[in-house]
Image (cartoon, rainbow, N blue to C red):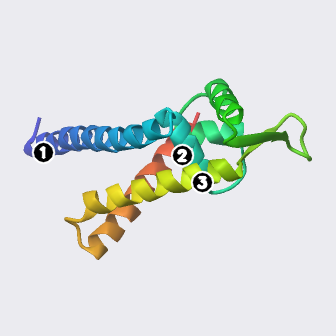
Amino acid sequence: MDARTGAREAASTGLVELTFRLHGRVSSLLARDARQHRLTPSEAAALLALAHGRMSISRVAEATGIRPNGASVLVERLRERGLVRRERDARDNRVVTVELTPHGRAVAAELDARAREQLEIMLSPLSSPEQAQLLSLLARIVETGVRTAQSP
């Protein structure tokens, strides 16, 4: 192994470790805030995703990182609690769409505000241009991951 390969592997290992640490930190914060509303972290993530508008159950699954059958169960739990409503798509009866109820919007807004507060604290060591650059880089990484996952 040459020096360049060794440096690349060391950087990759460091990136993996930091990514897991960051994921753990953000997940812990979301879990804590979700518990205040008697929600699981996945349920809270679904509410945050649905705050952007109506979506199919498969899109809820994608947004929360769970399987479609798990998303169906999750959505049903949220429906039973009056946080979302489900309906068949008018154009394709096979597709079920989900949207927040007024109560669900209120809970999602609280979760979003708390997440923004926590992220502001976490990002405070970075300047505004550094925060913008981080956002841009993370978006590229996520998009690459989505395209890679969709490749045969």
Q: Nearer the viewer, residue 44 or 139?
A: 44
Residue type at tag 3: Ala
In this rendering, would 86 be left or right of 147? right
The part of the image, by quadrant, that contains residue 53 is: bottom right
Looking at the image, do the residues carrying marks 3 and 1 touch, with CB atoms under 8 Å apart?
no
Q: CA distance from mark 3 to mark 1?
A: 48 Å
- Please provide percent x and percent y for residue 46: 58, 42
Residue 149's place in the image compared with 135, above or below, is above
> Pointers 2 and 3 in contact (CB under 8 A)?
no
Pointer 1: what residue?
Answer: 7
Dot 1: within a 10 Å radius of its alpha carbon, few (fewer than 14), some, or many (20 or more) residues?
few
Q: Is residue 59 left or right of residue 141?
A: right
Which numbered disc flags the more N-terminal residue, 2 or 3?
A: 3
**Quadrant assignment for the C terminus:** top right
Q: Is residue 150 left or right of residue 111?
A: right
Q: Which mark is residue 106?
A: 3
Q: Residue furthest left?
A: 3
Q: Which residue is mark 2?
A: 147
* Label 3 vs label 1, nearer the camera: 3
Quarter of the N terminus within the rendering: top left
Where is residue 99? Give x, y as percent.
72, 48
Q: Could you classify mark 2 by the number of other residues whose Cα lies within 10 Å: few (under 14), some (14-19), or many (20 or more)?
A: few
Image mark for residue 84: none
Disc 1 and disc 2: Cα gap in Å? Answer: 27 Å
Secondary-structure class at tag 1: helix
Dot placed on the residue nearer the N-terminal end, 3 or 1: 1
Label total for image: 3
The amino acid type found where label 1 is placed reads: Ala
Q: Residue at x 65, y 49 (%)?
A: 103
Q: Residue at x 31, y 67 (%)?
A: 131
